[in-house]
Structure formats: structure tokens, C-alpha cells
Amino acid sequence: MKPLLSQCLIGHRFGKINVSKDYFLCCGTPAIGNYDVDGGFKEFWNSKKYNDLRKELKYNLEGQNEKWNGDCFECPHYAQLMMLNESGEVIDDLPRKGPSEFQFEVGNPCNHRCDFCWGWSHTMLSEEGQWNGWKEWAKQILDLKTYVSIINDLKELGGCELISISGGGEPFIIPDIMKMIEHTKKLGFNLKIFTNFSRVNFKDIDNFIEWGVDRFEVNISAGTEETYCKVRKLKSKDWNLLIDNLTYLNEKRKELNLSSPIKYVVIVTKENIEEIDEIFELAIKLGCCFIDFRDLVSQGVYKGEDLLPLEKQVEVFNEKFFKNINKHYFKEVKDEYYFYSERLNMGVFNECISYRG
């Protein structure tokens, strides 16, 4: 377990709300407030409650971590490291008017049944596999009025540069999602959307380009039609729809000489770990700006042990990974974690820490 640093300033940089209208300080900690109880985000951001919590993180991170049952130890972003220099000195321009990034979890309904998903895997569809309250959770969405209220507060506060739209399911199932996206871009925010990109059409994509949506983090987690359909319980037509949508987006952005907004996300499991060659080839064909290989993450009642790669598969993954890195002229940018190819104008993240050789 890595040691905690002396302080964390994520409370000044990040904010989040979920479908229950709960506010979160970061992506891994318990709720710290609620829209209906503590008011709109501007009011809550400037409240004594929020300010006291930021101070607690800055001056007593270890104590706060104990209250949160050790969640800070599991921080995937190493937020503390980004705030301090090598001497442990704070290098932040606090106080901030508002967070620099805010994440909206807009809905939990989903049209896929991915084996690796903690919320919608086949395990969740059986009575014995569901956690208490899953059926209610699976229907929840964030209403447009609340979304617009918070976005407007963020604009008024100033300082927020990036909005993320995600959820426990597929955002494009939410009835008002296009209104949310359009309003966000009209206010001038950078916007990234976590999606399986299956519930959009060519007209939607034309709108995305017109509005200037900056990034789509598309969870594909396969390199072939066979694996894609097997993992998600889908049919060939679903794979063809995905490829058609991404191809159309890539062609339209090239026509307009725009940078690629497509990040190819891969949750690495024993079902797809040997398709790394196909993943690189498809990402290049689709003009992706990034490939992001991620560990399988256990959450709640879903553990996913049956999907963990075998030791031999991990060896093959590491071998093929660096073979592709060299083949496509990627250069290491950081610690066998981030690579970039000027020739392809593409980055590769290898977040599979537990799979590295």
C-alpha cells in the first residue's frame, strides 16, 4: 500500500454529482452533500461545510482518510502527487473560484450487458447477483433542470475548464442528453463523454461536430466482432453499427481538418487480452487519438475474478504491447505508462499496472 502524502488539494480542483443528486469531492470517496439538501453547486462550493472539508484534506489528510475507510489509498489518479513538487511543497494557486473539472453521472440505464461491468454484467441480471436496491438504481437518471442549474453555476463561478458526462450506464439513453451536450458547449466548456457510442446516429454526429464536442471515451474492449458481441451479449449488427458510427465521425472530422475526438477504451480481461494486435489496427483505421488499456476493477458485489487474465496471457499481452509500440513508432513519454506516435498523432495509455512485466 502506497504511503499517503501530507495533503490533497483535489477538493479545489474537482467536483461531481450523481443521479441521486449527491455531491462528491472526487471519484472514489463517499458523498459529501446533496443538491436538494445543500443547495445549488455555487452555494455548496462556497459553504462552510465544503470549505472545512477542503481544509481537512489539506491539513489532515490522514485523519480524513480514516473517516473514509482508506479510500484515499486507492486513489487512481494519485491526486496528491499532482499538487506537490519533489520537495513536498504545494505548487497550487489556491484559492480557486470553482473546480477546474466537474463530472456529471447522468444516468444508470444501459443497453449493453458487458461481462466486466460492475453495474450491468450478467451477474446483475440474476436475483442472487443483484445488490439491494439495484432495480431502482438501474432506472435512475439526472433531470435536465438540475444539470442546467449546476452547469450555469460552474460558468458563473469561473475556473471550470472540463465537463465530463458519464454514468452507471449509457449516457445516450437519457432523454435530454442532447440538450445537456448542446447547452454545455454553448457555455464554452471542454466536454468529454464516456459512452459505448451505440445509441447515436449520423445526424447526432453532425451535431457533435457542429457543437465542438471535444472527446468521446468509447468503451469497445475488443479487437474483433466475435469478442465484442460475446462480451456484451450482442449481435453482428451491433458491431457494424458501432464501426459505422465511428467511421462516419472520423471521416467528417477529417473533411473539416479537425483533431480526432475518439479515445478507444479497453478493459483488459482474459476474453480480449490476446487481441492487442487487432485493437491497434482498428484504432489506427478509425483515426483514434488514444488507446487506453485499463485494469479490470472490482466494485461492490461484482468481483470479476472469472475474467482475470491467466499468467500466460499476461506474458503475451506484454510482448505484443511493446511489439506494437515499436511497430507503429510510439515513443515512451512516461514510465511505460504513456506513449505517443507523431506519425499517427496517437497516444497510448497502459493503465494495466498489475499486468505489466
Image: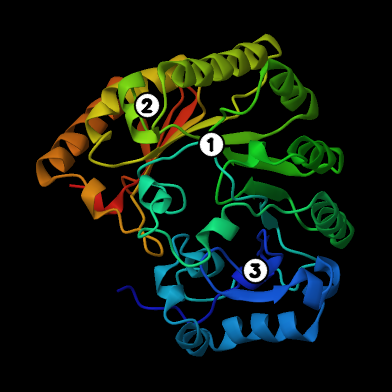
Total numbered labels = 3
Q: Position of residue 116 (x, y in %)?
A: 36, 46
Q: Nearer the viewer, residue 51 or 150?
A: 150
Apparent side of residue 328 relative to residue 147 in the rendered image (left or right)? left
Label 2 vs label 1: CA separation?
Answer: 13 Å
Q: Residue at x 44, y 31 (%)?
A: 220
Residue that carries the numbered disc 2 in the rendered image: 229
Relative height, residue 251 to residue 297 (above, below): above
Q: Position of residue 105 (x, y in %)?
A: 64, 53
Among the two numbered marks 3 and 2 on one chain, the one whose residue lies closer to the N terminus = 3
- Indicate which disc, 1 or 3, sits on the residue closer to the N terminus: 3
Given contact means CB atoms under 8 Å apart, are the residues at marks 3 and 2 in contact?
Answer: no
Q: Residues within 10 Å of mark 2 (few under 14, many from 20)?
A: some
Most extreme residue toward the front is 127
Vertical side of 199 occupied by 125: above or below = below
Q: Is residue 299 above or below residue 144?
A: below
Q: Which residue is mark 1?
A: 111
Left or right: residue 109 compared with residue 312: right
Residue under numbered circle 3: 92
Q: CA distance from mark 3 to mark 2?
A: 46 Å
The foreground one among 38 and 258 is 38
Q: Position of residue 190 (x, y in %)?
A: 72, 42
In contact (CB < 8 Å): disc 2 and disc 1? no
Name the residue at 35% across, 43% down.
Answer: 115
- Residue 100 falls left or right of residue 310: right
